[in-house]
Amino acid sequence: MAPGKNYNNIAAFHEKLASSKRILALCGAGLSASSGLPTFRGAGGLWRSRNATDLATPEAFEADPGLVWLFYTYRRHVALTASPNPGHFALATLAKKLPEFLCLSPNVDNLHIRAAHPGSQLRLLHGSLYQPHPLLDPAHTLDPIPSASLPTCPECESLVRPDVVWFGEPLDEAMLTEIDAWIDATEVDLVLAIGTSAVVWPPAGSTERARGKKTSLVTVNPEAEMPGNLRRMRTRDFAFAGDAAVLLPQLLEPVTGKPRADGTYK
Ligand code: BJW
């Protein structure tokens, strides 16, 4: 496969956008990079010299719940002190203008919601940093618990955990079924893959499922125009290399209008 000659041409993308009624977006950690939040893979993917992905597992929590809580408490603090960036605002505004735009986001940082993205057009695939989750089973013991100060359930007193989806855990089945039904209802015109390495399933599977005969896949990522990505592209696909916070307002402008200087919209 090979990209068409206009694969990174904004005017050509705007033409496709103008005829697009059904748009699916898969966002990833890169969308929040400009807000100052580290991504999982590549630069910024380390926390206290550990791989962030190694800490996002039930095994890590079982081995050292204090460390994993510290990791999530730190991330919660960093996300609270961050602000949504122009990319979040552009997506939220697209949703308000286009009823058939659905945004899938595994990001747990709450920035879509703080950008006022309509909840009916947003699916938070991996949960949220701001909701504690009762531990699997009150009878389940996690010895040794290093500190008495870890949060416990007020009713059953078992240790609670962050309400996020870790590797090897199922995503909300009803949510996945509803997303599949939305994708299958009729052909999706545009699939936006924004700031994601697109290696984690099932989210990566949703973008594959949505690629029909006339669908254009649009990748927005600093690595979008690297040879490996270009080789995988079809002629109608687009790739824009750069920061999602800069590119999204430009790419979506025909629908959203121009943002104000602070990235928000009227
Ligand atoms: C920028 C930028 C800028 C930088 N602008 N861009 C099928 C095939 C193969 C494997 C599997 C499969 N099905 C399941 C699996 C296993 C596994 C999986 O996918 N593994 C792969 C790694 C191979 N999946 C699971 O385990 C999932 N569960 C599941 O499938 O359950 C089935 C089951 C059924 C029944 C019973 C039991 C199980 C669960 C996956 C959960 C992942 N959780 C995490 C943590 C969430 C909580 C938290 O935040 O801590 O989700 S891991 C982490 O990776 C997080 C992310 O959401 C996810 C994806 O990462 P993302 O967003 O793509 O970030 P990065 O860092 O990878 O990429 C950032 C990108 O941004 C880069 O490309 C940069 O270039 C770019 N960028 N600056 C734009 N300014």
Image: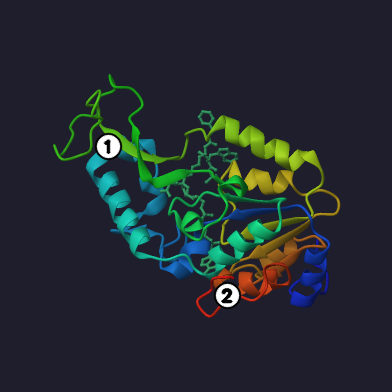
Label 2: few (<14), some (14–19) or many (≥20) C-alpha neighbours in 10 Å: some
Q: Is residue 70 left or right of residue 28?
A: left
Q: Amino acid at mark 2?
A: Val
Q: Residue at x 61, y 36 (%)?
A: 176
Q: Earlier in the sequence, mark 1 or mark 2?
A: 1
- In the structure shown, which secondary structural element does the residue marked by tag 1 occupy? helix
Residue 41 at what x, y percent from top left?
47, 58
**Height in image: 252 above or below 169?**
below
Q: Which residue is at the front of the view, 43 or 238?
A: 238
Q: Which residue is mark 2?
A: 246
Amino acid type for the residue under numbered disc 1: Ala
Residue drawn at x 29%, y 22% as measured from the top left: 140
The residue positioned farthest toward the right in the image shown:
213
Furthest-front residue in view?
266
Picture quarter containing residue 75?
bottom left
Image quarter of residue 202? top right
User: Residue 151: x, y in percent?
Assistant: 23, 38
Kindly identify which numbered label has been placed on residue 63. 1
Which of the two discs, 1 and 2, sits closer to the camera?
2
